Image (cartoon, grey):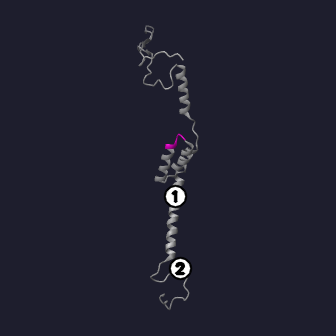
Amino acid sequence: MAAPLNPAASHYLPSFITPPGETDVLMIITAVILAVSILMFGILFFRLHSLPERMAHGAGKLQLEIVAVLCLLGLLTHIHAFWVAALLLALIEFPDFPGWLGRITGAVERIAGLKPGESTAAEVTPLKTIVDTGQTGPAAAPLQETRSRPAKQREPTHA
């Protein structure tokens, strides 16, 4: 049974005013809506901040790590220029330089008679080195040539 109303109160009370001692349903509904709204806003915020990274990852871009770091910097520092730079980098298509250089390397190795991937930079030594004696003038000696051996003797291959 509800408590009697105060004589100074109006005789009609709206439904959102609860009697003393009962559960305030409107406050519970408002709290749930507020919690869901904050959660949805946070999800939207983080998805928007990771948009350039997801774009670069989906396209298999070479600059994915740079874009990811710029997105993280933009998120943590709230400097929007980092996010804009990440978005621009994610949209730019860079040429495939490693692919081109790999094909050039393979072609040069085939021309040299090597199997692709056989030679490394550590094995390659100059065959001829020019040494300057430091003398000048008409009596200067001609440049001397010195020879060095390759680091590894290779057997000739007949392809």
Q: Residue furthest front?
A: 159
Residue bearing mark 1: 43
> Is 63 part of what is drawn in magenta?
yes
- Residue at the location (51% across, 88% down)? 9
Amino acid at the residue labelled 2: Phe
Determine the CA span between mark 1 and mark 2.
Answer: 31 Å
> Residue reaching furthest bottom?
7
Q: Is residue 84 visible?
A: no
For the residue pair 46 and 109, the one nearer the viewer reads as 109
Instruction: Return the residue at label 2.
Output: 16
Image height check: is 103 above or below 43? above
Residue 130 vertical position relative to residue 44 in the rendered view, above or below: above
Decide which of 136, 41 is in the foreground and name it: 41
The rendered magenta stretch, by its main secondary structure, is classed as loop
In the drawing, what numbered circle is on residue 8? Answer: none
Hey, which quadrant is residue 135 in on the image?
Answer: top left
Going 50% across and 21% down the picture, which residue do you hit?
Answer: 114
SS category of the residue bearing label 1? helix
The tag earlier along the polypeptide, 1 or 2, is 2
Image quadrant where one finds the C terminus? top right
Relative image position of residue 46 (x, y in whole percent) = 51, 55
**Total numbered labels:** 2
Queried whether the magenta region covers residue 56, the answer comes back as: no
- Judged from the image, the secondary structure of the residue bearing numbered disc 2 is loop
Q: Position of residue 133 (x, y in %)?
A: 41, 13
Q: From the viewer's perspective, is 100 left or right of 129?
A: right
**Mark 2, residues whose alpha carbon is within 10 Å: few (<14), some, or many (≥20)?**
few
Looking at the rendered structure, the kind of residue marked 1 is Ile
- Region in magenta: 61-65
x, y (%) of residue 113?
A: 52, 19
